[in-house]
Image: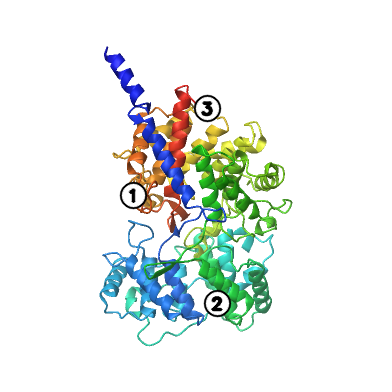
């Protein structure tokens, strides 16, 4: 009798899992889908803010002053933004909820002082106290010290050498510009002009920041720990000192040739629309180099460059700030895949329009990747609106996932553009079996020991997260485990599983991201999800679920391994954990059901984000430890993807329509 009553109750309120009503799940998916469709741009793409730390905007003030482009209105708006972002302790962090970041705080203080804020203003006093309490100028990174040197606040001798002559080193030489990552290359090449010229822009009286310096900052030079040739770090420090001494000699036989080559390289690497490498550091340094080389403000390259800078700016409530990058192709591809997961028809106008827009952005010209991969033809996609010289493997894989599933308005996509993209992507596999983001075999670890590379992100080695997404995509296009490139990719991923079962995340925070992608890639290609590697990963994800049912991981986990998988629950990271567990056949696990509950219960019912989710936390990674991102689209499309795949998997397991 009791069982009959329960059966009747289930018929009245169908449940797709224990305690999860199918109607509630359906409504959540529908509301999320409607929200995404409502924010599609008229041209067919999706994009939202790519939020980073405040240095990106503080440096805009430096740039305006140094190049004599000061706009008082814009400066005032940036000042309002910086003050709005300052915390009670006077500091600025690298990411939401993070500790004081000495570089962000020093650069913000300097920008505010240059803009005219007096040192005795309350916000400045608090910022100065935070700087001194966290190690002061001595603890700042190379880039911050260079900005200080550009405005005469410290000596250029305190900054590592970046000789402009590196541009003339042949490609076969152990250290040349093509042995460093694309983002470093686009920044370092023009920066070498700045460093070689050692310019100083004098600040007006009262606008300097000498009050930040203490006795311990009198010697800011890099200190070796031993003799040269005993280890790479010390060897490079002695080499840096030697280069600086040579640089003071008046006779520089290769200087003119190198400057001409850097000038040519910089102009060749400017997009038709004005962008340089699609990132703020490359854009600012390229324009600084052209300024020092005597280019007038009205020169076409400078005009286009400034138009590109303006496209990176965002404004709200009288505040102005700059994005480090813009992510329309990435946002659009994942959004389309999430909508397809939710059951949106493949010929839906929104998807057709998105597909047509993506096709129009395919890279058909050769870029820097050809130096190490000369035999390949172009065909990938970039991350940004304009970046034809630097397509990336991650975006290309996500786009190919979408094109494999969506018919679009013209099925010839799969016969021409997609084949071209696939050929390019396969050619980009590194010798280790994995894929980097922009280059092949960009993995000479010793280069991260040069004094200039104190951020340890000078390289673009193959990573598990990128390789896993590519493996996932290859499976959808019919590649089998027996394929030689697939076998190497599988081995690459499995060999890099951590002892406790998770995987490191290079481009997302952090082990939750890496584990989600590894499980999805391995499952898609046909690996046994009951095998020990999968069970270990499942136990790790289960063991890191928060009491509220969600998952979260702080960016601090990159520096403190004990924090891996730990942090405030977020919509995007909860979605990643669920996607990993669902891929591992854990759809009926109570852990999964609690995670689904978390997403349904935290979905917004009103306001600007009604039907979607909001998270303050940064869950994207630019450079582990040093630079983090909040992709504002992540909180929108990843939960939809997770809920939709849960719905399909649960129905399939129950014998229903789970297609």
Q: Identify the element where label 2 is drawn.
A: helix
Query: Tag 3: Cα neighbours inside 10 Å, few (<14), some, or many (≥20)?
Result: few
Residue under label 1: 606
Q: Position of residue 543 (x, y in %)?
A: 35, 35
User: Does residue 158 sit above or below 522 in this rendering?
Assistant: below
**Mark 3 or mark 1: whose residue is earlier in sequence:** 3
Quadrant in the picture for residue 536: top left
Q: Identify the element where label 1 is drawn.
A: loop
Q: Position of residue 155 (x, y in %)?
A: 45, 79
User: Does residue 349 sit above or below 89 in this rendering?
Assistant: above
Residue under label 3: 528
**Mark 2 or mark 3: whose residue is earlier in sequence:** 2
Front in this rendered view, residue 152 or 393: 393
Front label number (2 vs 3)? 3
Q: Position of residue 642 (x, y in %)?
A: 44, 38
Residue lying farthest to the top in this orientation: 1
User: Does residue 350 sit above or below 532 in this rendering?
Assistant: below
Alpha carbons under labels 1 and 2: distance apart: 64 Å
Alpha carbons under labels 2 and 3: distance apart: 60 Å
Residue lying farthest to the bottom in this orientation: 205
Q: Is residue 269 left or right of residue 39?
A: right
Quick check: can you spot residue 351?
Answer: yes
Residue lying farthest to the right in this orientation: 375
At a point 52% along the width and 27% down the height, the residue shown is 528
**Mark 1 or mark 2: whose residue is earlier in sequence:** 2
């Amino acid at each position: 009798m009791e069982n009959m009553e329960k059966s009747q109750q289930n018929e009245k309120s169908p449940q797709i899992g224990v305690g999860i009503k199918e109607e509630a799940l359906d409504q959540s998916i529908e509301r999320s889908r409607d929200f995404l469709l409502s924010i599609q741009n008229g041209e067919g793409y999706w994009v939202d803010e790519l939020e980073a730390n405040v240095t990106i905007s503080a440096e805009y003030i430096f740039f305006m002053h140094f190049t004599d482009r000061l706009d008082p209105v814009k400066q005032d708006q940036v000042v309002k933004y910086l003050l709005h972002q300052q915390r009670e302790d006077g500091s600025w962090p690298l990411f939401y909820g993070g500790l004081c970041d000495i570089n962000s705080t020093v650069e913000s203080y300097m920008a505010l002082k240059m803009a005219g804020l007096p040192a005795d203003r309350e916000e400045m006093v608090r910022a100065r106290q935070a700087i001194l309490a966290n190690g002061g100028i001595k603890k700042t990174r190379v880039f911050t010290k260079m900005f200080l040197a550009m405005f005469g606040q410290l000596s250029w001798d305190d900054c590592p050498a970046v000789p402009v002559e590196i541009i003339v080193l042949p490609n076969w030489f152990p250290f040349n510009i093509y042995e460093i990552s694309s983002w470093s290359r686009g920044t370092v090449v023009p920066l070498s002009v700045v460093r070689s010229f050692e310019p100083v822009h004098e600040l007006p009286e009262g606008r300097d920041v000498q009050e930040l310096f203490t006795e311990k900052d009198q010697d800011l030079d890099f200190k070796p720990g031993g003799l040269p040739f005993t280890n790479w770090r010390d060897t490079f420090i002695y080499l840096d000192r030697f280069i600086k001494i040579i640089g003071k000699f008046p006779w520089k036989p290769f200087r003119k040739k190198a400057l001409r080559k850097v000038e040519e390289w910089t102009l060749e690497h400017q997009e038709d629309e004005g962008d340089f490498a699609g990132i703020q550091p490359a854009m600012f340094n390229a324009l600084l180099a052209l300024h020092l080389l005597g280019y007038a403000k009205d020169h076409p390259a400078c005009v286009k460059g400034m138009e590109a800078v303006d496209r990176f700016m965002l404004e709200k409530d009288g505040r102005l700030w700059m994005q480090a990058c813009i992510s329309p192709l990435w946002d659009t591809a994942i959004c389309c895949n999430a909508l397809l997961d939710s059951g949106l028809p493949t010929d839906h106008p929104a998807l057709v329009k998105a597909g047509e827009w993506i096709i129009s952005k395919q890279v058909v010209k050769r870029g820097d990747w050809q130096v190490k991969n000369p035999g390949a033809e172009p065909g990938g996609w970039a991350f940004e609106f304009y970046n034809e010289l630097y397509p990336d493997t991650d975006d290309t894989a996500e786009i190919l996932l979408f094109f494999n599933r969506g018919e679009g308005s013209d099925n010839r996509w799969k016969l021409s553009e997609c084949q071209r993209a696939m050929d390019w992507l396969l050619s980009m596999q590194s010798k280790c079996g994995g894929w980097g983001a922009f280059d092949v075999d960009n993995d000479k670890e010793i280069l991260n020991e040069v004094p200039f590379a104190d951020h340890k992100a000078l390289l673009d080695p193959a990573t598990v997260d990128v390789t896993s997404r590519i493996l996932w995509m290859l499976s959808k296009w019919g590649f089998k485990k027996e394929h030689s490139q697939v076998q190497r990719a599988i081995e690459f991923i499995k060999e890099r599983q951590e002892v406790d079962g998770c995987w490191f995340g290079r481009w997302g925070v952090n082990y939750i991201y890496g584990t989600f992608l590894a499980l999805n890639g391995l499952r898609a290609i046909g690996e046994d999800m009951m095998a020990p590697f999968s069970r270990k990963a499942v136990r790790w994800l289960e063991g890191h679920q928060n009491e509220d049912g969600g998952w979260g991981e702080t960016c601090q986990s990159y520096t403190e391994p004990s924090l891996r998988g730990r942090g405030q629950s977020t919509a995007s990271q909860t979605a990643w954990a669920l996607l990993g567990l669902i891929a591992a056949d854990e759809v009926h696990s109570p852990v999964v059901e609690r995670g689904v509950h978390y997403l349904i219960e935290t979905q917004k019912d009103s306001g600007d984000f009604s039907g979607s989710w909001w998270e303050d936390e940064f869950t994207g990674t630019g450079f582990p430890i040093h630079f983090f991102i909040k992709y504002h689209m992540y909180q929108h499309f990843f939960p939809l993807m997770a809920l939709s795949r849960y719905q399909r998997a649960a129905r399939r397991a129950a014998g229903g329509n789970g297609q």
